[in-house]
Amino acid sequence: MEHQAKAIDEILEHYPEKSEFLIFLLQDIQSEYGYISKDSMQLVSDYTGVPITQAYSVATFYQSFRLEPKGEHELRVCLGTACHLKGGQRIVEELERKLNINSEETTKDMMYTLNTVNCVGACALAPVLLVDEKYETNITAGKIKKILKKIESK
Ligand code: FES
């Protein structure tokens, strides 16, 4: 923890103590830690003088910022029109049940983060699941079982 605070200080020192550097600081912290913790957000808010609630609304406005740590593997279910029509929502529910989390959450063991995305350009193979950057297509409950088994056997 102390180590983290120190490194954040180093990141802060790269920028003037001004509100217009908020985004740069958040970007640097995220690329260092993978997400922006509550403590980091507080430090950035104190440093830039941007009120904490405003700093959070900026961070949530830009979807690329993460406020929670990400699991080792990211599962993204496509909910674009074609995937939705072919049962994308059922895939989300199946994964939520299997992993015991809701969408946009990470499992306690930090193994998986579950998210949804819009069309990923493989509509003919709907429904589509992205496992990290890999496309898994024509997803069924049975396929999900196999995919998770394969990840866990590694
Ligand atoms: S809608 Fe899912 S790939 Fe296009």
Image: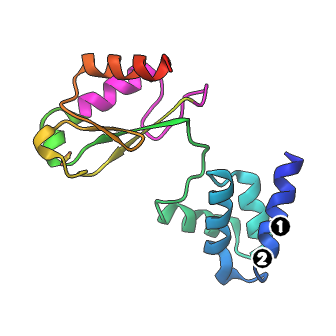
Q: Is residue 87 above or below residue 23?
A: above
Q: Which residue is painted at 48% across and 28% down in the image?
A: 101
Q: Which residues are magenta?
A: 89-110
Between 8 and 18, the one nearer to me in the picture: 8
Contact flag, marks 2 and 1 (Cβ < 8 Å): yes
Q: Is residue 85 left or right of residue 9?
A: left
Amino acid type, mark 2: His
Q: Which residue is painted at 25% across and 51% down in the image?
A: 120
Q: Which residue is painted at 36% across and 23% down in the image?
A: 147
Whether disc 1's CB lies below 8 Å from ligand 1 is answered: no
Q: Around disc 2, counting alpha carbons within 10 Å, would you say few (fewer than 14), some (14 to 19), or many (20 or more)?
A: few
Q: Is residue 55 left or right of residue 39?
A: left
Residue 97 on the magenta segment: yes
Q: Position of residue 21 (x, y in %)?
A: 67, 79
Quadrant of the image occupied by residue 91: top left
The circle drawn on residue 10 is 1
Between 151 and 139, the one nearer to me in the picture: 151
Dot 1: what SS? Answer: helix
Q: Position of residue 102 (x, y in %)?
A: 44, 32
Q: Is residue 147 left or right of residue 53?
A: left
Amino acid type, mark 1: Glu
What residue is pinned by disc 2? Answer: 14
> How many angstroms separate mark 2 from mark 1 (CA)?
7 Å
Residue 96 on the magenta segment: yes
Quadrant of the image occupied by residue 136: top left
